[in-house]
Image (cartoon, helix red, strand yellow):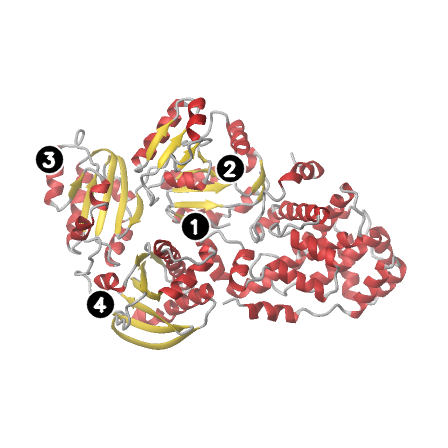
Amino acid sequence: MKPVLKNGIAVFSPQGFLDGNNTNSFLSIEDVEATAALKAEMILVSLKKVIFFNRNGLDTFIKLFLNIRKKNQVTVGFCDYDKKKYDAIKNFYQDNIHFSLFQSLEIAYLFTSSFKNKGSNVLIYNNDKSERSAMAIELHDNGHNPVIAQTLDEFNQKKVKRETYEYIIENSFLGQMGQKIATRVTGNAIIYTISSFLDNEISDKFNMDYHNNSLNVGFRLFIFDAYKVISMNIHALNFFSKLSSAAAEYNATICFVGMKFDKTPESFKNTLEDAGVLFYNQMDDILQNKELLSELGASSASNIKHKRALNKETILELPKFIDATVATLEMMTNAKAIKEHAEVSTITIKDKKDKIASSIGYYGALDGMVILVFPKNIAKKACELLIGESTEDIEMILDTLAELVNIVGGKIKTLLADENISVNITLPRTYQDVDSLMEVVGDRKGVQVDLLFNDDKFLFFLTR
Amino acid sequence: MITKATVDAFIEKIPPTPKILQECLLLLNAGELVKAAKVAEGDLALKSYLKNIVNKPIYGFKNEVSDISQIFGIFGVSLSQQTVYNYMISLLNPDKWELFKLNKKLFYELQATLSKKWEMVLRHLKIDDKEVYSAISLLPSSIIVTEAIFCQKKKDVILLRSAKALDYNTILKRLCEVDIFDICEEIAKKWQMSPKTISIVQASSGIKPLEDEELNTLGKWMHLLLFYELSQPQFVESGLNDFIDFQIEYVGDIYNDFASLMEIQ
């Protein structure tokens, strides 16, 4: 069984009955390895569609996931259960729970750094005082407004005021949360979450390939969410100084938010500032300030460092890139694609009206970036399969488009793997108009293929 | 690309009921077990199928049973008819399974287990109705339909499902506005199965409850039985556990009764 990855959480959704006999069948060794490679913040098993489970059934999942946690520091556990199931789990494990329990997937999202809807009002109750405090701290650190009910009576009184709280948390248990450098994309900024003591391990935990390729696909603002950092040593200082100097070559900016210097020498701050790192107290100081965002480069991102030519390897594999894109879009839109025109040039978009775009980078044995420019109609049609209904909400269309481009990226990865060419893909980036795309692509040369889906023109562009 | 034309082409390819089977079913319907057995003798593949099924461990016979009259005698009218329908469904079995890690042997095992446990359910519910007995035969056709429709797009569908937890039934419904169980209905109509059989199997999808309370309850039992079987390790490994969505709320009111009957602890 394969998990679904969304908002940094990989979720397995078994159905029916879970016991010691069948849980091993849900997860093959390949499934476990593939899940570990996803680099998710959390790995959860949804019990929504499980009608029966016993301790043996849960144990098998937990054993497999704890192995992943040892390597990747992810949070593991269960979600989507009712009170009866929660009580059963607590009863099975008593005080020996080493995993997390979230009553719903939406509640679990609140505890990830990837979740977009920050600032939610959240009512919390747990009969264990330290547990409810731990939840409140985590939620606060993730940018939410937790309210703790100190007693069950208080909780029952408060929870009837549904309009006051966007989320109500009960029957949940944090257990051991993972500690890793999580990544999320907000608008066009990439946010890394760092915590605890920063030392020479930072260079192992930080995914440098991912970072470099994010630079290459046009991301220009990298924010380190450092609210939970206690201190940093000289090795970490050197790491961030080098990272910032390297980013400057791309005209990119590195910021630290919420970093305190009570246990870290103040001189470190000066050194980092000299290397070009900017410091802010609050995340909103950047994210809510459009002018500053623009100045820092989140919406202006011409790539000045690498203007690399397409190489022979990329050209040889070009049909696979096009096939992957066409096959995915044909499946999602149920329309046949007709190839109209192909040439090597800078990107040319004749009619910019009502177009949205998305890009995804790949790196490894080959590297480059695929850009897809959609008429809104095709984007909406393609997203209908994933959403289940048509929508005019541009945010939702762009979000779903990112999922779709992720599927295209996944297909490219699979097709190349069939030829023993190993690549990884970056997070997808979306653009709500052609102008913001052009700021990233600039005058890079690439292969442009114009396609026709039911009379709607669709553009594929592959560049490096 | 999966379109309505893909679905229509599949339905078009379903062969009509072979004459021997038609005759055999008519005789079974009239309760003529001996005559039906004689007719069945004329179809070597059916004969082999019946022998294979009856000698599976789930039936618990110590010595091999090979005579068709004896097999029909053991099964009785309702189960014999159900088994002949099972055989008809097995004719749709693909030469090679691509989407699911299945083979003929495992598919027959699923058919046999579902049939045997459906019999347990009907005895428990004190229902003795040939059409209701036969309904379980149509259920595994949903798996064959899914395999046939999606096998050419296996990789695409796997990628799609890694981005969004969509079951095959939902994907097909969103792409073509028909679902897997609608296609099963077309198969049943082509093979002149009864409307009652069709209704129960449609209800067993878990998303089309029936107004008729008795048939709807049977749909619930069938839905839960299906997921009970699809939770067995060999079917989980085959990739069948999540091929359609399990509707846990739909079966909530019969679960305790089911758990007690199947001795689930």
Labels 1 and 4 share a subunit: yes
Please tell me whether mark 1 or mark 4 is closer to you in this view: 4
Please tell me whether mark 3 or mark 2 is closer to you in this view: 2
Q: Are marks 2 and 1 in contact (CB under 8 Å)?
A: no
Please tell me whether mark 4 or mark 2 is closer to you in this view: 2
Q: CA distance from mark 2 to mark 1?
A: 25 Å
N-terminal of the two: label 1 or label 3?
A: 1
> In the rendered structure, which amino acid carries the disc numbered 3?
Ser
Q: Position of residue A184 (x, y in %)?
A: 31, 47
> In the rendered structure, which amino acid carries the disc numbered 4?
Arg
At numbered mark 2, what does the secondary structure look like: helix, strand or loop?
loop
Q: Is residue A48 left or right of residue A454?
A: right
Marker disc for residue A267: 3
Labels 4 and 2 share a subunit: yes
Q: CA distance from mark 3 to mark 2?
A: 50 Å
At numbered mark 3, what does the secondary structure look like: helix, strand or loop?
helix
Labels 2 and 1 share a subunit: yes
Residue under pointer 4: A444
N-terminal of the two: label 1 or label 4?
A: 1
Please tell me whether mark 1 or mark 3 is closer to you in this view: 3
